[in-house]
Image (spheres, grey):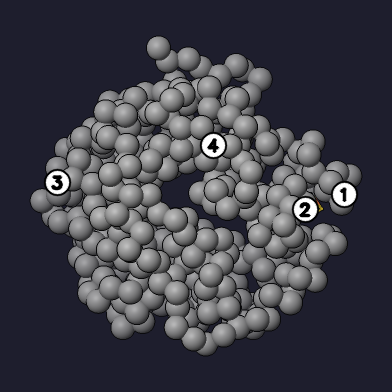
Amino acid sequence: MVTTAPKALPRPLGLLAELTHRCPLACPYCSNPLALDRREDELDAATWARVFTEAAALGVLQVHLSGGEPAARRDLEDIMASARQAGLYTNLITSGVGVTAARLDKLADAGLDHVQVSIQDSEAGSADHIAGYTGAFARKRALAAEVVARGLPLTVNAVIHRANIDRVAEMVAMALAMGAKRVEIAHAQYYGWALKNRAMLMPRRDQVERAVATIEELRARHRGEIVIDAVVPDYHARFPKPCVGGWGRRSLNVTPAGKVLPCHAAETIPGLEFWSVREKSLADIWQFSPAFTAFRGTDFLPEPCASCERREIDFGGCRCQAFALTGDARATDPVCHLSPDHARVVQLAEEREDVAYHYRDLAHTGS
Ligand code: SF4
Ligand code: FES
């Protein structure tokens, strides 16, 4: 039986469905955890169908079918069809590798509404080096052309870091040439794999300032043609981002093995208890799971957040970052210039190392 959450609780709008951690790419800023779920532990399509029905009953409008590379699932079409059946708007987040034209047709027939393709750079050699996969650049462009040819809306997502930040304008031009209606300039977020590679990814302040100015200029120039979403990278900001729109407030993530997380990096916080869709309904998890209730709202926040007028705007920033930088997930996110730990962020933003990336380790996928 499908149950719904009481009215007093916020309702989630989006569900990130991590269908698999398997992926042909090995990006050094991957948001998947360091310990990847194994293929044999992945939820089956019938369980995903139940999760989507429960999500819709809870208020979720949009499902992001993600991974890893979701196309690594041979039953992706069945999973897509069940999301459509549940009445959810479906967004496929793909590396572009593994989705052929024939597969795209089947996915479109099954209910695909929107496609998001990641790009690593505007130059093929650099892009393939960052992805750790020769030929990825060409395959992404080919898939984008197939998506646009079918009239499906396309968003291009570009993760920005020291190796590509000077080519923000070229990446926006590339997104336009690919026929995208939206481009997301997403600076690397330092959890998981990106935390391991922080010194290799960290841009210089002058690079960030130039990129911010370039984006403003591009927004004005391309208004009406393409939407450019971008935020200042954490370590160079004055205020933190309202991470995931507030913990347990707007969205939930389901891992390939079925654990439900308030954000993709929540497993980096030790001591949190995550419930699984294998044992509980999504409504119960949303309302009662210890991981979701741990940092919901703002009551737990210490000073300076406790008496700050921005606390209902940014919720004290990101819990995972607060833990990564202070060892206390309840602390004010040290990205905030008012945090007593902010000096640490300033120091880390200056630490750079030009050595090989630690690529995401496929050996842990069980594929
Ligand atoms: Fe946000 Fe806390 Fe900084 Fe205020 S003190 S701006 S609530 S992080
Ligand atoms: Fe977990 Fe920000 S990534 S709260």
**First in sequence: mark 2 vs mark 3:** 3
Q: Residues within 10 Å of mark 1 (few under 14, many from 20)?
A: some
Label 2: which secondary element: loop
**First in sequence: mark 2 vs mark 4:** 4
Which residue is depicted at the point 65% across and 32% down? 293
**Mark 1–mark 4 distance (CA, rounded to whole Å):** 28 Å
**First in sequence: mark 4 vs mark 3:** 3
**Mark 1–mark 3 distance (CA, rounded to whole Å):** 54 Å
The image shows residue 108 at horizontal and vertical percentages of 20, 42
Relative depth, front residue between 124 and 169: 124
Relative depth, front residue between 318 and 22: 22
Contact, mark 4 vs mark 3 (Cβ under 8 Å)? no
**Dividing the image into 4 quarters, which one contains the C terminus?**
bottom left
Which residue is depicted at the point 26% across and 33% down? 45
**Dividing the image into 4 quarters, which one contains the N terminus?**
top left
Label 3: which secondary element: helix
Q: Amino acid at mark 2?
A: Thr
From this viewpoint, is residue 221 visible?
Answer: no
Residue at numbered disc 1? 303
Q: Amino acid at mark 1?
A: Glu
Residue at numbered disc 3? 105
Q: Which mark is residue 274?
A: 4
Q: Amino acid at mark 3?
A: Asp
**Mark 2–mark 3 distance (CA, rounded to whole Å):** 47 Å
Which residue is depicted at the point 35% across and 72% down? 131
Query: In this view, which residue lies farthest toward the left?
Result: 102
Residue at numbered disc 2? 332
**First in sequence: mark 1 vs mark 4:** 4
